[in-house]
Each structure stands twice: as structure tokens, then as C-alpha cells.
Image (cartoon, rainbow, N blue to C red):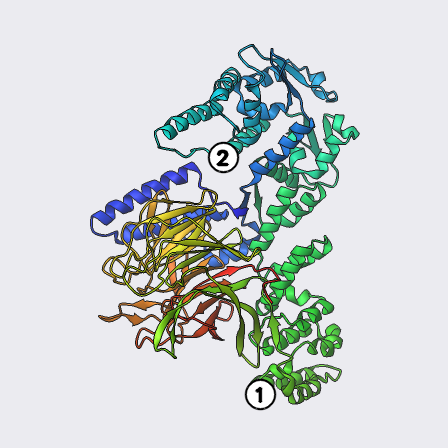
């Protein structure tokens, strides 16, 4: 999985610890005070500036530059470090295939009892201190002439002493390529340990000791989990190989580009590049050359790609990503290519989407082009306000306008975009006006909107030398196309679906509330006359076993996880059970139960694990515990607890950090708090919200967090919370956004196509159900009514899930 990496250097980790300790002391003394708040703000700004790779973060931290202007001016210079966390595993899997096929091997290990293993020197030296020393001695003994002569397939042979047996050495080799040892039974441990001691493999000796300890503890009924995973072992080994490259140790080829020379290992290069794999393994003359000159490749780009081969990380900015992508395509470096595509997918915005689309079209990257053009359609109004929009070719603009999936607040926005494009060069573009206007669906305009069409048409006729004739055609379509307006509505079919699960609803026939097992999803979005929008709901199926509400849902690896909640309304009806839904197989699987019963809690994903945070144990008691679920082991374990019991809160993960807002404390008072939760370090308090709230929603969008809905303690009894806020993690500050028009207490929320949906809930004043769907568009700063809920309204949960086409009937 590719993720943005935001790892702190050691000095910043120390600063984090000191800051946390100072804050703890001030809290114990009865308050933080203005000085602490200022220090916290400076720290948050500096910390996040470093995380984002913002150049000049010192000036930004000290407030010597305006943040908005600074970001606009430095946009191309902002560098993000993208990491492929599966990179070590994938690299060693390929290099193991080389080993098994005898490709690019340069080290033979022989045992006295006939063992013979042809391996890769850099890989073995990365785990063995003995072989690392042998490699250093080999480099010292090589003459300058030998270093410049061709590297034919010449392997160094090392004969090992009798203490290393043929049955023990394979364990060392296996560990070097996989980070673990399979079938390490009692008889094998002694032989493997002897080989590891002779070759000086400290990490492997630890593994042998750990295995023996596990066996003892298992015999005593105490099974301890392995501390260091095979993935971590491979990561450490790759880091050792990277250090060897820096020391030019074991490098068997030099790449010469633009007068610069890069020393690298063939096996690493071939494992990360199909281009070099073909060069080194197919008998080409370059496979025997010590120095290879590359043409049409930039040294800066090659250096970044080589670093990526050894580390799995790649620094990218808008000023460099296109050229690095081109070079990765040319050299067929798939790991780096995937990171470049991740950057283009994740960092695309209205100012860059047209460049991305043009680039993808030029280099025939179909998936990227489809994504970029769909982004233009979804954000057409914002894209039309950028200077680059005015440079669009007429045929491309017409293609966007005629597309059903074009998303605009109203057709007036599409009309204004066409006018702006024409007026950028009226002498040349007026001839395209009539054809472009055919893409504007005038029957979907209101009479008030159409008055602007008439006024603009008259002005253009007066200013232009030729008769425009826009208004007549538009009037005809507007006047006579109304009966057919339903067919001309804009209809979008989102690639992902907004899925709603469970909840409960008042059954009017029986006069009582009824829990639900139903799952509904949004199939399409429809734009109708003026600002009228609606969603089309479709029924997906039902959850297994009992119905549930006040539960929690999350999505990991394309699968839906449902946990906890209540199946009825009695004190003992809180659940511990968890299920997983696989949409590809359209099947449910029962998972291990949580340790504690939970309702009104949150379930979020961090580092490929699920965290169940807080919640109500029953109707009178809430929890401070946090449980972590590992999908691989199907096991729940307790993480660092919260500092106080919490339920009805909202949790979102942004840039790998878990943010928690509001909720009820142990006395069921609504909170204003906002804090970070770390599974090992606990919590770090951030700036409080301006309003207290619980049973609300919080979603991330464009690097910010939005809170909406819920209840508050405005009076002695709970009151509907209509005010909404936005949190800026860079500045650790809150700002107001438009309020909701109706209450949404204990509703659901999700972000679909960069817009926030608030669904269902109830009104605290009279407990009437809020069966409506509202959508917040950050571009227009407006909440839109998107129609009604299809089934249950209250205590529902929502998420974004990709459904295969056969389920979207």
C-alpha cells in the first residue's frame, strides 16, 4: 500500500516528548495559560511544516510570512515524501527469485559436507558481519585496473569451516532473503544457530533465541508473539544494503549520466527496474560493462529513482513529478512509478488537474487520464476559475460540457465558464460559441438564471463584430425543452459508493422503533433544475444475525468491517461481535469478538489495523479503553487507554494521526476537546472547538477536519447543535463554516467525491427523525439538500466502499 510518509527525525521526536511533558506539568498546575498556548501553536506549525516538507518552515513558524500567500508562491516547491511500505517485501521477493534462478549471483558459499549455495554478495553481507568484512577486504584487494575492467560472471567462492553444516546454512540464506526461517524445529535450531554464529548474523541469533523462548513459554501455556516481523527484518536488511551503496561497497556497476557517476548493485537495480533486468540478464553487452552511460536521462531524476530503489521512498513536488514520472517510465521502474501516480492522484487540485490530464494523454497513461478528467468534471466550477482553463482546446471543453457526469452547482455555472473561455480571446473563439453552447443544458435553468444568459448574450452581440445568435437558440431550447428536462439532467455514477448500514427507525404501523440489518448505497447523483439535487438509493442486502444500531464501521483493504453497537434497547443489549464483508465475493465473515461491549464508539484504520475507541458499555457507563484489531491474526488487543471515559465522540485519521473530537465524558456532559491519540504514547491535546458537541460527525477533506451535527450543553438539557466548524491541523485552529439548516443528531457521515454528506439522525428538541441527506460543498461554502434517506434514519453508520459492477444492478 502506498501512503504519504510523515516521519519525524530524532531531534523532533525529542522536542515532541519535551513539549508533551511541559504540557502535562502545566495541566497539573491548573491550566496551560497563554504562554503554553502560544508554544503549542508554534510547535504545531513547525511540526506540520516539517511533515509537509515546506521549505522555509522557520519563517512560517515565526510568523514572518503570510501563510496563504506563502503557500501560493511556494506551491511548486512543497515537497512530499511518498513511501511504498511494501517495497522491502516486494524487492526481496524478486531478489529471491533471482537467487532461485541463479541470476546475477556473485557469491558461492561452500560447506565441508558438500553444501553449495550461489547467492548475492550484497544481500548476504547485509545480514552477516563476517561476509561484510570479507566484502570490505575484497574491495581493498582489487586493483584500479580490475575495478575498470569488465565484470564478467565471476563469483567469489568462500569455503566455510566444519561448524557450518549443509543443513544449517540454508536457514541463513533464507533469513537473508525473507527475514524469517520456516520450519525452525528443535533439531534445526542448533544447526542454524551454529551457522549464524560462524557467519556472525546477530539478528538471526535473536530469532533463534526467540523461537526457543516461544517453545518454552508454549509448553507453559504462555505463547508470546514475535516482536520483530519478517517485513521489519527485510526493511532493516535493505537499509544495510543502502548503507553499503553509500560506502560504494559491493557495487558492481556504475551509471554515468550528465557527467555524474552513480555506484549501484546490479541485483537491486534489476529487482526494481524491468529495463535494467533485461539489460543485465539477457546477455547484452552492457551486462559485462563496469560503466554504463545512459542517454536522455537527467541526473537529478536518476538519483531520486535510485534512492527509491533502495529505500522505497520518493520526494515529489509539482516542480519535479512529471519529469521523474517520465524517467520512471523510460527505465520501467515500477515501484517509483506507482509512487508518482500516488502523488498525482492524491495531490491533484483545480490548478493542476488539466496539466495531469494532458500529461497522461501524451504518455498514454489511461487510468491517470481517466482520473484527471473525472476530477475536472467533479470540480468544473473551481477549474473554470483557474488561468489554465482558458488555455483549453475548444474540442476538449466541448467534451467536458457534453458529458452527463459534469458536476456544477447549476447550469448557469457551465454557461459562465463558456463565456469566460470565449472572452479570453473573442476574435479567435467566437466561432466556437454556438457549438460550445450546445453543451449547456438551458432547460435545467430557472427563469432567474436565464435572465443572465439574455443579458450576457446582448452584451456579446454589442461588443462583437459578428452576430452571436446565442440567445435565440438558447431561448428556443429553454422554452420548448422543459417537458424533456428529466432526460437532460446531469447524472453522475460515482466509482465508489456511499454505503449506509444498520440503524433504527420508527415503524408507523406498530408505533415502535425497529432496529435494522439493512445496507443501502448511493448509486447515482442527479442535478436537476436550478440548484435541485438528489441521490438515487439502492438496496444492497442485510447484515448477518441480529440487527444493530449505534455500531461502528470502517473499510480496510476494500472490505467493510462492522463491530459493536446495540441489537435492542435494554441495558444488556450492547454487542461485542464483529463482522467483515467482502464485496467481491458478496459474503460476510464472523470475526473475533472485541474484549468489551461497545456502542456509540468509533472504529478507524491506522497502519493497516483497526482501532475501536471508547464507547458505551451500557446505558449508564462509558469506556476509556481502546482495542486494536489485527486482520492477519484475527485478534483484538488493548492499546494505550484514553485519559478519561468517552462516548458519542467522532474520530478521523489524517496523515496517519488519529484525531478525536467532542463526545460525552463519564458524567455525560458534552465536550469541546480535540486531541491526538497514539496507540503507544496516549493523547496530546489540541485546540478546543468553539462549541461543545457529542453524537456528531467529523470528516477529513483537503487536509482539514470538519465537524457537524450532534447535541450540545447550551442549556441544562441537551440541545441540537447546528453550528459547524473546520479544523486546520497546520495552525491548530478552528474556523466557522455555514450551519446546518436542520438537526442531525446521531446521524452518519462520509466524504464522496470531495463533498461531505451528513445523513439522517434525529432532532433533540422533539425526537423527530431527520430523514434528509445534506451535502457540504467546500467550493461553494453551502449545504445542499440531496433528498431523503431510503430506510433507517437514526444511529446509522456510513462509509465509502467500492462495489463491483455486478452488485450495482
Answer yes or no: is residue 601 visible. Answer: yes
Q: Is residue 600 left or right of residue 392?
A: left
**How many numbered marks, from 0 up?**
2
Using the numbered discs, state the Cα–Cα distance from disc 2 to disc 1 in whole angstroms. Answer: 65 Å
Instruction: Describe residue 559's horizontal placement relative to residue 658 as left or right.
Output: right
The reply, left or right, for residue 346 in relation to residue 554 is: right
Location of residue 423 by image quarter: bottom right
Secondary structure of residue under mark 2: helix
Q: Nearer the viewer, residue 239 or 35?
A: 239
Q: Residues within 10 Å of mark 2 (few under 14, many from 20)?
A: some
The residue under label 2 is: 232
Closer to the camera, 461 or 357? 357
Numbered disc 1: secondary structure: helix
Q: Is residue 247 at least partly visible in the picture?
A: no
Mark 2 or mark 1: which is in front?
Answer: 2
How far across and how far down the image is residue 352, in percent?
A: 61, 58
Mark 2 vs mark 1: which is more N-terminal? 2
Q: Locate residue 44, reporting x and y percent.
A: 39, 50
Between residues 676 and 735, which one lies in front from this camera angle? 676
Give the quadrant of the C terminus: bottom right
In the image, residue 773 lies at what x, y percent? 46, 72
* Residue 699 in the image: above or below residue 467: above
**Residue drawn 59% across and 66% down?**
378
Labels 2 & 1 near each other (Cβ < 8 A) = no
343 and 386: which one is in front? 343
Rendered image: mark on residue 520: none
Neighbours of disc 1 within 10 Å: few (<14), some (14-19), many (20+)? few
Q: Position of residue 302 (x, y in %)?
A: 66, 38
> Is residue 239 placed above or below 652 in the rendered structure?
above
Residue at label 1?
447
Amino acid at each position: 500500500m502506498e501512503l504519504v510518509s510523515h516521519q519525524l527525525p530524532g531531534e523532533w521526536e525529542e522536542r515532541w516528548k519535551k513539549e508533551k511533558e511541559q504540557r502535562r506539568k502545566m495541566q497539573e498546575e491548573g491550566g496551560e495559560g497563554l504562554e503554553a498556548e502560544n508554544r503549542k501553536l508554534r510547535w504545531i506549525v513547525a511540526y506540520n511544516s516539517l511533515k509537509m516538507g515546506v521549505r522555509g518552515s522557520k519563517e512560517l513558524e515565526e510568523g514572518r510570512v503570510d501563510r496563504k500567500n506563502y503557500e501560493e508562491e511556494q506551491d511548486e516547491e512543497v515537497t512530499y515524501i511518498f513511501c511504498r511500505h511494501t517495497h522491502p517485501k516486494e524487492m526481496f521477493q524478486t531478489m529471491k527469485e533471482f537467487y532461485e534462478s541463479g541470476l546475477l549471483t556473485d557469491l558461492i558459499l561452500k560447506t565441508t559436507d558438500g553444501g553449495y549455495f550461489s547467492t548475492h554478495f550484497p544481500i548476504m553481507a547485509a545480514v552477516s558481519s563476517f561476509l561484510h568484512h570479507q566484502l570490505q577486504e575484497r574491495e581493498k584487494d582489487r586493483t584500479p585496473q580490475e575495478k575498470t575492467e569488465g565484470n564478467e560472471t565471476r563469483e567469489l567462492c568462500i569455503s566455510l569451516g566444519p561448524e557450518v553444516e549443509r543443513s544449517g546454512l540454508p536457514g541463513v540464506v533464507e533469513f537473508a532473503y525473507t527475514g524469517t526461517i520456516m520450519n525452525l524445529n528443535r533439531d534445526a535450531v542448533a544447526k542454524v544457530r551454529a551457522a549464524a554464529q560462524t557467519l556472525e548474523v546477530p539478528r538471526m541469533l535473536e530469532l533463534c533465541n526467540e523461537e526457543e523462548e516461544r517453545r518454552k513459554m508454549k509448553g507453559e501455556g504462555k505463547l508470546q508473539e514475535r516482536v520483530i516481523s519478517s517485513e521489519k527484518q527485510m526493511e532493516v536488511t535493505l537499509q544495510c544494503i543502502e548503507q553499503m551503496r553509500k560506502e560504494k561497497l559491493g557495487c558492481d556497476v556504475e551509471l554515468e549520466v550528465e557527467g555524474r557517476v552513480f555506484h549501484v548493485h546490479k541485483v537491486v537495480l534489476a529487482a526494481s527496474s524491468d529495463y535494467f533486468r533485461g539489460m543485465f540478464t539477457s546477455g547484452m553487452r552492457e551486462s559485462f560493462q563496469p560503466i554504463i552511460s545512459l542517454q536522455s536521462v537527467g541526473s537529478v531524476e536518476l538519483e531520486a529513482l535510485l534512492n527509491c530503489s533502495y529505500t522505497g521512498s520518493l520526494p515529489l513536488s509539482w516542480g519535479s513529478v512529471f519529469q521523474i514520472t517520465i524517467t520512471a517510465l523510460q527505465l520501467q521502474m515500477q515501484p517509483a512509478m506507482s509512487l508518482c501516480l500516488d502523488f498525482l492522484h492524491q495531490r491533484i487540485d483545480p490548478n493542476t488537474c488539466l496539466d495531469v490530464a494532458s500529461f497522461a494523454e501524451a504518455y498514454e497513461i489511461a487510468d491517470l487520464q481517466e482520473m484527471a478528467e473525472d476530477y475536472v468534471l467533479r470540480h468544473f466550477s473551481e477549474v473554470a476559475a483557474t488561468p489554465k482553463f482558458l488555455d483549453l482546446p475548444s474540442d476538449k471543453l466541448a467534451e467536458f460540457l457534453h458529458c452527463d457526469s459534469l458536476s456544477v452547482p447549476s447550469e448557469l455555472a457551465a454557461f459562465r465558464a463558456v463565456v469566460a473561455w470565449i472572452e479570453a480571446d473573442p476574435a479567435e473563439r467566437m466561432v466556437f460559441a454556438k457549438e460550445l453552447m450546445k453543451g449547456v443544458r438551458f432547460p435545467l435553468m430557472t427563469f432567474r438564471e436565464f435572465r443572465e444568459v439574455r443579458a450576457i448574450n446582448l452584451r456579446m452581440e454589442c461588443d462583437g463584430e459578428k452576430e452571436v445568435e446565442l440567445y435565440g437558440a438558447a431561448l428556443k431550447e429553454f422554452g420548448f425543452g422543459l417537458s424533456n428536462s428529466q432526460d437532460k439532467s446531469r447524472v453522475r455514477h460515482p466509482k465508489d459508493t456511499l454505503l449506509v448500514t444498520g440503524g433504527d427507525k420508527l415503524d408507523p404501523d406498530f408505533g415502535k422503533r425497529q432496529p435494522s440489518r439493512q445496507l443501502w448505497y448511493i448509486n447515482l447523483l442527479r442535478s436537476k433544475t436550478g440548484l435541485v439535487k438528489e441521490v438515487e438509493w439502492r438496496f444492497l442486502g442485510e447484515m448477518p444475525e441480529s440487527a444493530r444500531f449505534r455500531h461502528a464501521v470502517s473499510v480496510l483493504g476494500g472490505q467493510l468491517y462492522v463491530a459493536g453497537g446495540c441489537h435492542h434497547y435494554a441495558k444488556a443489549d450492547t454487542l461485542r461481535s464483529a463482522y467483515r464483508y467482502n464485496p467481491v465475493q458478496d459474503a460476510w465473515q464472523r470475526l473475533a469478538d472485541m474484549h468489551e461491549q461497545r456502542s456509540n464508539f468509533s472504529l478507524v484504520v491506522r497502519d493497516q489495523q483497526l482501532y475501536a475507541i471508547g464507547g458505551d458499555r451500557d446505558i449508564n457507563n462509558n469506556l476509556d479503553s481502546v482495542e486494536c484489531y489485527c486482520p492477519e491474526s484475527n485478534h483484538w488487543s488493548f492499546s494505550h487507554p484514553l485519559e478519561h471515559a468517552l462516548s458519542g465522540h467522532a474520530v478521523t485519521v489524517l496523515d496517519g494521526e488519529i484525531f478525536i473530537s467532542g463526545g460525552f465524558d463519564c458524567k455525560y456532559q458534552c465536550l469541546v476537546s480535540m486531541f491526538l491519540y497514539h496507540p503507544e504514547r496516549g493523547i496530546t491535546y489540541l485546540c478546543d472547538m468553539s462549541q461543545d458537541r457529542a453524537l456528531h460527525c467529523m470528516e477529513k477533506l483537503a487536509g482539514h477536519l470538519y465537524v457537524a451535527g450532534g447535541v450540545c450543553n447550551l442549556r441544562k438539557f441537551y440541545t441540537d447543535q447546528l453550528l459547524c466548524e473546520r479544523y486546520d491541523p497546520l495552525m491548530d485552529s478552528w474556523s466557522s463554516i455555514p450551519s446546518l439548516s436542520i438537526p442531525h443528531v446521531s446521524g452518519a457521515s462520509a466524504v464522496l467525491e470531495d463533498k461531505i454528506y451528513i445523513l439522517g439522525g434525529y432532532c433533540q428538541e422533539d425526537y423527530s427523525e431527520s430523514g434528509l441527506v445534506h451535502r457540504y460543498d467546500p467550493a461553494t461554502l453551502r449545504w445542499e439538500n440531496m433528498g431523503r434517506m431510503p430506510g433507517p434514519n437514526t444511529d446509522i453508520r456510513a462509509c465509502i466502499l467500492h462495489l463491483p459492477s455486478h452488485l450495482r444492478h
